[in-house]
Image (spheres, rainbow, N blue to C red):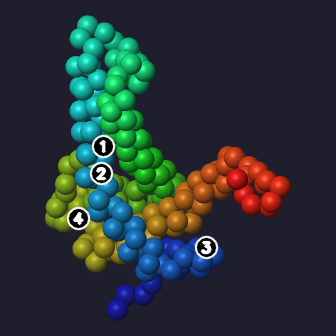
Amino acid sequence: MRRETRTMQNIKMMCGGLKLCPEEVLHKSTLVMRVYRDVVWMTARRANLMKEEAISYSIGRELDTALTYLMEFAPTERKQDFEAKVSSLFETKWLVDLIDTAMLRVRDYPDNGKLYFDILSKSYMTALKYTELDLLEVFNLERSIFYERKREAAILLGIALWGFAIPELQNLFVKTKRPQYVDVSGAYS
């Protein structure tokens, strides 16, 4: 069995400091990355369909005029359908942005960050799917070293997501949450 790399020791230490289990982080981040490519594709496809739909309502008008028409003058059912689509699209976009933010943290990691970023990107996120042989050739690594680096990269992504990006976003929501008002009976309104 191979000796644990210094980087993996540091990663495990970071996990400990953030109260994260490295194996759980690895499992979660791998699951997220496996669906990332499809989520991005579906989001782009839905955005294009919505754009085409909006344009079709407004022959000869600019897109912003068509959107204004849909939002302000369309019948209630159409407006609700449109709002649901837009809301869903932005929720998906928000999740993609969260992963992209975490990937930038991985890239900025001081020890092999660029390599980790590239491994995750080419393994899970680019539109072009690479085979294992392609990846080994691109990175000029032995299979065992490649999988060791890929594992380190996936855990780093998990640390970036569950240790930094998600907690930072949660703190932002807490800070921007409207204050709750207490009525005379003491119940929250």
Which residue position is annotated with label 3? Answer: 18
Which residue position is annotated with label 2? Answer: 39
Crowdedness near tag 2: few (<14), some (14–19) or many (≥20) residues, C-alpha within 10 Å? some
SS label for mark 2: helix
Which residue position is annotated with label 1? Answer: 43
Task: Calculate the distance from the C-alpha at mark 3 to the C-alpha at mark 1.
Answer: 32 Å
Q: What residue type is labelled 4?
A: Leu
Residue that appears at 28% across and 27% down: 51
Instruction: Please give the label number shown on residue 69.
Output: none
Q: Which amino acid does label 3 sit on?
A: Leu
Task: Calculate the distance from the C-alpha at mark 3 to the C-alpha at mark 4.
Answer: 32 Å
Crowdedness near tag 4: few (<14), some (14–19) or many (≥20) residues, C-alpha within 10 Å? some
Q: Which amino acid does label 1 sit on?
A: Thr
Q: Of discs 3 and 1, which sits in the foreground?
A: 1
The residue furthest top is: 60
Q: Earlier in the sequence, mark 3 or mark 4?
A: 3
Q: Of discs 2 and 4, which sits in the foreground?
A: 2
SS label for mark 4: helix
Crowdedness near tag 1: few (<14), some (14–19) or many (≥20) residues, C-alpha within 10 Å? some
